[in-house]
Amino acid sequence: MSAQAGPDAKHGSANSARGGNKGIKEVGADRKEKTQGRSATLLIVPTMVVLAVVILYPVINAIIMSLEHDQGLDPVTGTFVAGGFAGLSNYAHWLFQQCTDPSGATVSCPPGTLGAQFWGATGVTFFFTVVTVFFETILGFWMALIMARAFRGRSVLRAAVLVPWAIPTAVTAKLWFFIFAFDGIVNTVLNTSILWTGSEGPARAAIIIADVWKTTPFMALLILAGLQMIPADIYEAAKVDGASTWQRFKLITLPLVKPALMVAILFRVLDALRMYDLPAIMTGGANGTTTLSILVVNQIRIGFNSAAALSTITFLIIFIVAFIFVRFLGANAVESASGGAKGKIK
Amino acid sequence: MPKKISRMLLPVATAATFALLLSACSGGSGGGGGGGGGAATENLDGRGPITYVQGKDNSDVVRPLIEKWNAAHPDEKVTFKEQSDNADQQHDDLVKNFQAKNVDYDVASVDVIWTAEFAAQGWLQPLKDTMAVSTEGMLPATVKTGTYRDVLYTLPQTSDGGMLYYRKDLVPTPPKTWDEMMSMCPIAKEKGIDCYAGQFAQYEGLTVNVAEAINSQGGTIVGSDGKATVNSAEAKAGLGNLVEAYKSGNIPKQALTYQEEQGRQSFEDGKLMFLRNWPYVYNLAKTDGSSTVKDTFGIAPLPGKDGPGASTLGGHNLGVSVYSKNKATAKDFLAFMTSEETQKFYSTQGSLAPVLESLYTDPTLVEKLPYLPVLLTSIQNAVPRPVTPFYPAVTQAIQQNSFAALQGTKTVDQALTDMEAAINTTVSK
């Protein structure tokens, strides 16, 4: 079934953009559902098993690990010993910034520990996400509108737009690192002497610029795919009816491209929430650019169990954000595909 | 039906999306406690083929050496396992394989700052009793980097230390003390160039520079019991020197973004009078086409309080895995890889500084690496970076707090108080 749903889903999602055909059931569908259901389950089982192995197991393992203390040093032998059951103290460590001082008392984590950086890193991560996705959406939409038109050299333009996306992020980051160096291109061209990677505001700006440059093509491409599913005759009909360009954009393009747009934004938000390589290479997380992922990686080198707790927290944060998107903002990455196919298949 | 499936699939498919997110996070699993207790007494007289693990062999020194070894030991052949050239990746690769008790990681090249961590995990074979190896003639500071709790775990192979590069056309005699160097800064100002720079961006290089500043004033960072000792008058004077110099402009403001390369660039461009850097800069500044200081720079030991300053140590040591099956062979290989002849080869072929004191005055080597005598002074006065199994956390505490002090968002006192507290909370988990 899922094989059929693929091509049909495209039309489906466009047609059902307003969710019009939800809950409609055809006569006689019940019996068909039963027999199909069994084979469908059989077909899905291998996938489910693979998913369980590669997703469920690591997630559960991480949660189990997060309930144990990091290994501590045996003061006599000087070797590491397992930390033992910790309950939720690893989570408290991050959420309430609780550390243990040499006398064994719980104190708030002093500056310079990773524990003290959790909320800062969360804030930075969301700041980057909101700002970069905002700019990427606006610019991506604009680029998609241009690319959707028929003109000479369109394929050249499409290829050119894709170049930043095709470059590995690590290379991009190194590139921008040099561009934003003190005697780099930016300072030379602007005739300024800003420490781009040496102070908070400019460092964040530099990372945002690099990220927008890199991922706008991705947005543009996803939106372009959405635009191309809108049948041209709708526009023709609207033109005949005398709709202005703005009206056509507002009343036809926007609503019909919305499902694709929401999916694109969802992908980008999830991607941006785990941003790692750009700040890691450009600033190393200095100057208020430590994201949650950087914090996790730093913590892994210090203690696995606290790192597992932090990963789990990060996972939950991203899960909640994605849930809000899917549930309330109608980013139907999953439902529009199968839901839309419903009417067509039968 | 499709609706039912879609409902069933929704959580799975959503989970699939998130699995991608997690993939970055679940890299290191199962960090079981120090497990090597029993393994350290096994296979001590085992002989047979072994594997040598090291980071990328950029100047092609390891392969010829291993060929030479293999020709002489046909029954105990060494296989070379080459890692990436990124230190963090090398570290994580070693951790992963030691955790898995991999018997194929017999001998490993260990960065000087990892010894304590690996030893505390019980992954390294103590080099004592039947495994004892000679450290005779090696510079004492380098042997210290391989020692954890008075037991030698890794054998020094190559060393590295900081040196002061200076413009001898502007300052005929190099400064011996920090204060003297600061008093020379007006000369740079007159010429319109910057006075002093090291590595002050927030990364490992900052730890190196701050540790040198603190050690040079007689301060320490971590005591022998692993507790912080950084909140002292000496440490305050050390960090205070850097902060003061930054405030007064003797350290230019862009130095806060400097790693090794940016400082070297500025020095070679003739825009910097004093530079603290590693020996690798010497050959580049002499031969780089773009270098404007080829004949006008000199080198000196780092300036200290009353005489030469305390450099931190770089370099690599060799350790034997407790899980190795052929430890007797590994021990012989260690001796081979640290022999005088091998070290000469390392120095001439790979430009890596030796650990044998006598080689620093060897005429043929000095001809090839003219900085060796200066480097010797540097290493003789060197203090290893904090020897603690919690090094990754300790270096974070140093970097973040000293960077804040340099930026001026924290006083030196506050930075040292925070540094002390941060180190103590991480070591008392």
Image: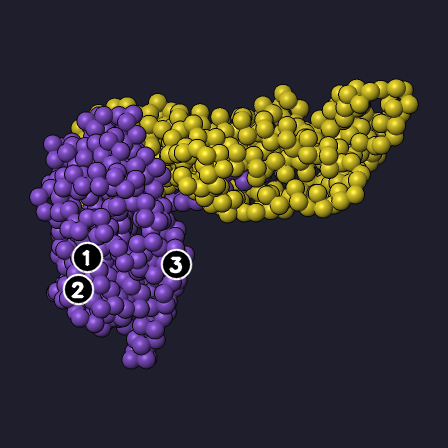
Q: Are marks 1 and 2 in contact (CB under 8 Å)?
A: yes
Vertical side of B327 occupied by B270: above or below: above
Q: Colour of chain B?
A: purple
Q: Colour of chain A?
A: yellow
Q: Secondary structure at mark 2?
A: helix
**Alpha-carbon span between mark 1 and mark 2:** 8 Å
Going by the numbered disc 1, the residue's amino acid type is Leu
Disc 1 chain ID: B
Disc 3 chain ID: B
Query: In terms of image quadrants, where is residue B79?
Result: bottom left
- Residue B322 seen in this snapshot: no
Q: Residues within 10 Å of mark 3 (few under 14, many from 20)?
A: few
**Alpha-carbon span between mark 3 and mark 1:** 25 Å
Q: Are marks 3 and 1 in contact (CB under 8 Å)?
A: no
Going by the numbered disc 2, the residue's amino acid type is Tyr
Q: Position of residue B191 (x, y in %)?
A: 27, 42
Q: Secondary structure at mark 1?
A: helix
Residue drawn at x 54%, y 47% is: A168
- Residue B172 seen in this snapshot: yes
Q: Earlier in the sequence, mark 3 or mark 1?
A: 3
Pointer 2: what residue? Answer: B360
On the same chain: label 3 and label 1?
A: yes
Query: In terms of image quadrants, where is residue A300?
Result: top left
Pointer 1: what residue? Answer: B375
Q: How many marks?
A: 3
Query: In terms of image quadrants, where is residue B417?
Result: top left
Residue drawn at x 82%, y 20% is: A244
Q: Quadrant of the N terminus of chain B?
A: top right
Q: Would residue A210 be found to the left or right of residue B58 on screen? A: right
Depth check, front residue: A253 or B403: B403
**Which disc, if any, is residue B289?**
3
